[in-house]
C-alpha cells in the first residue's frame, strides 16, 4: 500500500498545481488521507482521498458552507481555542478507487468534481 500511497500523492500534487488547489495530508485523526481543497464563495470544497485497509481508496467531496466571512471564520476556528466551527457540513461519496491505481481514473475523478463546482478544467 505504501507504493500506491506515494503514487496517489504524486498524482494529487500534480493536479493541485495544475488547477491551483491546496493539498493537505493526514487531516483526519489517526488515518492516512489526502485532501484537495478550494474556496468558492462561502463554500470550502474538500476532495478527500482515504486509503482503506481493504485495499481500496474512498473518495468523498466535503462542502463546508459558511454563513458569511468564510475565510475569517475558518481562520478563527483554527487560531482561537474553543472558537466554534460555524460552517454547515455536507458530504457525498464520489468514488471507490481500486488498486492498483490508474492515474487517469484519479485525474478524471478530480476533474469531474471540479466541473460540478463550476471550475473549468480544460
Image (spheres, rainbow, N blue to C red):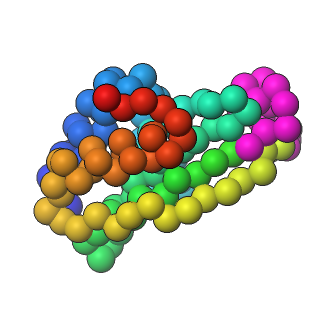
**Image quarter of the C terminus:** top left
Res 114 seen here: yes
The residue sitting at 49% across, 65% down in the picture is 93
Q: Position of residue 108 (x, y in %)?
A: 29, 48
**Rendered position, 104 above or below 79:** below
Q: Position of residue 87 (x, y in %)?
A: 78, 45
**Image quarter of the N terminus:** bottom left
Image quarter of residue 50: bottom left
Q: Is residue 38 left or right of residue 90?
A: left
Residue projecting furthest to the bottom: 54
The residue sitting at 27% across, 44% down in the picture is 107
Q: Position of residue 96 (x, y in %)?
A: 34, 67
User: Is residue 13 a member of the stretch shown in magenta?
Assistant: no
**Rendered position, 96 above or below 102:** below
Instruction: Out of 36 and 116, give the one closest to the viewer.
Output: 116
The residue sitting at 42% across, 30% down in the picture is 120
**Which segment is the magenta one?**
65-84
The residue sitting at 63% across, 48% down in the picture is 63
Q: How many numbered marks, from 0 up? A: 0
Image quarter of residue 83: top right
Q: Is residue 19 left or right of residue 43?
A: left
Res 76 seen here: no
Q: Position of residue 113 (x, y in %)?
A: 45, 47
Amino acid at each position: 500500500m505504501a507504493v500506491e500511497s506515494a503514487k496517489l500523492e504524486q498524482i494529487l500534487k500534480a493536479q493541485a498545481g495544475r488547477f491551483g488547489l491546496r493539498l493537505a495530508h493526514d487531516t483526519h485523526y489517526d488515518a492516512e488521507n489526502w485532501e484537495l481543497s478550494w474556496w468558492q464563495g462561502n463554500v470550502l470544497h474538500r476532495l478527500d482521498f482515504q486509503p482503506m485497509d481493504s485495499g481500496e481508496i474512498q473518495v468523498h467531496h466535503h462542502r463546508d458552507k459558511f454563513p458569511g466571512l468564510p475565510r475569517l471564520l475558518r481562520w478563527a476556528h483554527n487560531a482561537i481555542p474553543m472558537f466554534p466551527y460555524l460552517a454547515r457540513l455536507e458530504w457525498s461519496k464520489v468514488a471507490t478507487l481500486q488498486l492498483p491505481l490508474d492515474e487517469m481514473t484519479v485525474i478524471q475523478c478530480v476533474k469531474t468534481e471540479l466541473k460540478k463546482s463550476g471550475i473549468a478544467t480544460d
